[in-house]
Image (cartoon, rainbow, N blue to C red):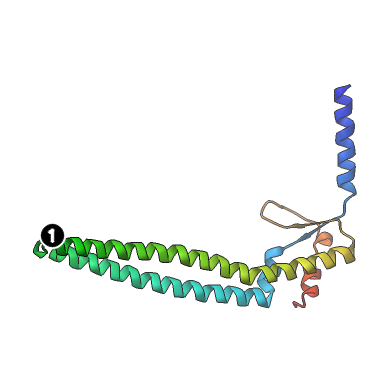
Amino acid sequence: MKRLSLILILAFSLSIVSAQKVAYIHRDSVFNNMPEAQKAQEELNVFLNQVQTEIETMQGEYQKKIEIFNQNVNSYTESVKTNKVTEIQDLEKRIQDFQVNAQTDYLAKQKELIVPIRDKFDKAVETVRLRLKYDVVMNIGPDVLYVNPKFIITEDVMKELGIK
């Protein structure tokens, strides 16, 4: 009896799933062709380059201080040695703090730039989904081996977004 109930539940579930109309989209392809996404990526790259330059400058300063310290360690008095070690440790902490703050700033900048683009994308997908009467839209990812092209709505979404 339990087995029959399980089979009936499974059959019913499969009939519900099979009744849904499913479409597929190449999300990355759409995003890569959205001008605002390209502009956002350029802004993020500029930000990352500025951060990288600053980190490299700070690390260069850090390495120089260590080299000078190591070259002169025998000539320093204990108080000077202590002072130099403190300077190096402070600079190391500043570098670490800068990296943490830069990462936080990057994530905030990424969210600021990407969220409106993702909202625009989602709205276009929803518009196309409703117009073509699909129940589900799924991204074509690396796990999908084949999708019948008639169920791919990538071009429709791109047209909705005004992308040629």
Residue 149 found in image quarter: bottom right
What residue did someone put label 1 on?
Answer: 78
Left or right for 30, reference 87:
right
Which residue is located at x 82 percent, y 64 percent? Answer: 126
- In this picture, is 7 found above or below 46? above
In the image shown, does 20 or 99 lie closer to the viewer?
99
- Residue occupying the far left of the picture: 75
In the image shown, does 108 or 56 lie closer to the viewer?
108
In the image shown, does 143 or 59 lie closer to the viewer?
59
Tell me where residue 91 appears, x and y as whole percent. Answer: 31, 66
Q: Residues within 10 Å of mark 1 (few under 14, many from 20)?
A: few
Which residue is located at x 79 percent, y 65 percent? Answer: 125
Left or right for 111, reference 55:
right
- Residue occupying the far top of the picture: 1
Left or right for 80, reference 60:
left
Residue 28 found in image quarter: bottom right
Left or right for 100, reference 94:
right
Tell me where residue 54 appears, x and y as whole percent. Answer: 40, 73
Residue 74 found in image quarter: bottom left
Tell me where residue 21 appears, x and y as whole percent. Answer: 87, 54
Which quadrant, please, contains the N terminus? Answer: top right
Tell me where residue 73 appears, x and y as whole percent. Answer: 14, 62
Which residue is located at x 89 percent, y 26 percent? Answer: 4
Secondary structure of residue under mark 1: helix
Which quadrant, please, contains the C terminus? Answer: bottom right
- Residue occupying the far front of the picture: 79
User: How many callouts does the rendering have?
Assistant: 1
Residue type, mark 1 in image? Glu
